[in-house]
Amino acid sequence: METKEAAFLKAHIGKEVTASPSPFMNWLRPIMLVVEEGRLEFQYKVRHEMTNPFGTLHGGITAAMIDDAIGATLICYGEPVFHVTINLVTDYFGAAKEGDVIIAQTAILKKGRQLVNAQCEIWNADRSRLIAKGYTNLIKTEIK
């Protein structure tokens, strides 16, 4: 059965995220592409303020996109409390430059009572080149 949170997210497919409870996600301004339990996809446009001195997507922004997208994926489960990141490992495989469109695909690999293991891949727009991949573990909090 679909949660009300998943239904809410599905209503935003094709729209730019501007009213997230995450101010950082609002700053990233992704477009919601796919909403499924345990899996989300977002599209981002690399803006100037997301780049490093070389004019490519800053690694810190890439890691933050991964962390933020995975956090949003947990919303689909409709739990009354938040999960926080314990660790995040990011592998960088390629670059995206200012003006490029990139896709983030998340997947919850294992969801236990307290811990969640997840990953996120960042692809170029036509999904022919993997830009980065992140792995993370999150722990359930008591924060509602």
Image (spheres, helix red, strand yellow):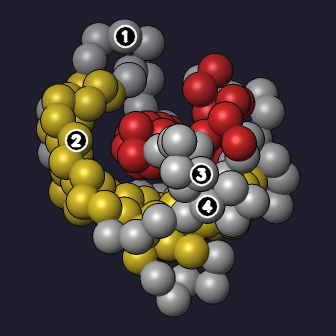
Is label 4 in contact with label 2 (beta carbons under 8 Å)? no
Asked if residue 96 is positioned above or below residue 60 in the image, the reply reads: below
Q: Earlier in the sequence, mark 3 or mark 2?
A: 3
Q: Position of residue 75 (x, y in %)?
A: 50, 39
Q: Position of residue 133 (x, y in %)?
A: 32, 63
Callout 2, which amino acid?
Leu
Q: Which residue is mark 2?
A: 88
Distance (Cα) linking label 1 and label 2: 21 Å
**Discs 3/2, front:** 3
Per the image, label 4 sits on a secondary structure element best described as loop
**Discs 1/2, front:** 2
Report the residue that reaches farthest toward the bottom: 128
Q: Quadrant of residue 27?
A: top right
Position of residue 119 in the picture relative to residue 110 (left or right):
right
Q: Which residue is mark 1?
A: 143
Is label 3 in contact with label 4 (beta carbons under 8 Å)? yes
Q: Which mark is residue 55?
A: 3
Per the image, label 3 sits on a secondary structure element best described as loop
